[in-house]
Image: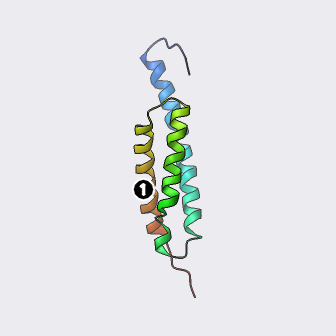
Amino acid sequence: MKKKFKNLKEVRKNIDNVDTRLVNLIAEREFYAREAVKFKTDRRQIIDRKRINTVLSRVKKLSKKYKISSSTVEKIWKLMIQNFIILEKKLFKKPKK
């Protein structure tokens, strides 16, 4: 992704545009987390270590593909996952018998 910029203001405008897209994508991810919790019948299903490891492995591979810091990507995803776990715990309702 090579682009020539005239000044700092132009760079920051592009960063702001990326931030807007990121927030939109995080909102979409939250929608799916809210949907996923509806299918969980036991609180223990909220933290799925196998799924977490799969997601982290996948984004690490993507970070290498796009030549960005896999450490940074992993930290961001871990934080995001932790926050969606908190959300799911708040939303979880036991199924009625």
Image coordinates of residue 81 in percent, x first then y, are: 45, 54
Q: Quadrant of the C terminus?
A: bottom right
Q: Which colour scheme is used?
A: rainbow
Image coordinates of residue 56 in percent, x first then y, are: 49, 48
- The image shows residue 70, relative to residue 55, as above or below, that is above
Q: Which residue is drawn at 55% across and 52% down?
A: 29
Q: In which quarter of the image is the N terminus?
A: top right
- Asked which secondary structure carries label 1, the reply is helix
Q: Which residue is drawn at 41% across and 56% down?
A: 82
Q: Which residue is drawn at 51% across and 25% down?
A: 14
- The image shows residue 19, relative to residue 24, as above or below, that is above
Image coordinates of residue 31 in percent, x first then y, are: 57, 56
Name the amino acid, label 1: Asn
Q: Residue at x 56, y 45 (%)?
A: 25
Residue named by callout 1: 83
Relative depth, front residue between 38 and 11: 38
Relative depth, front residue between 5 and 77: 77
- The image shows residue 7, relative to residue 86, as above or below, that is above
Taking the view exactly as shown, the residue that stands out farthest to the bottom is 97
Relative depth, front residue between 10 and 73: 73
Horizontal side of 61 relative to 83 (left or right) equals right
**Few, some or many C-alpha atoms within 10 Å of disc 1 (few <14, some 14-19, many ≥20)?**
few
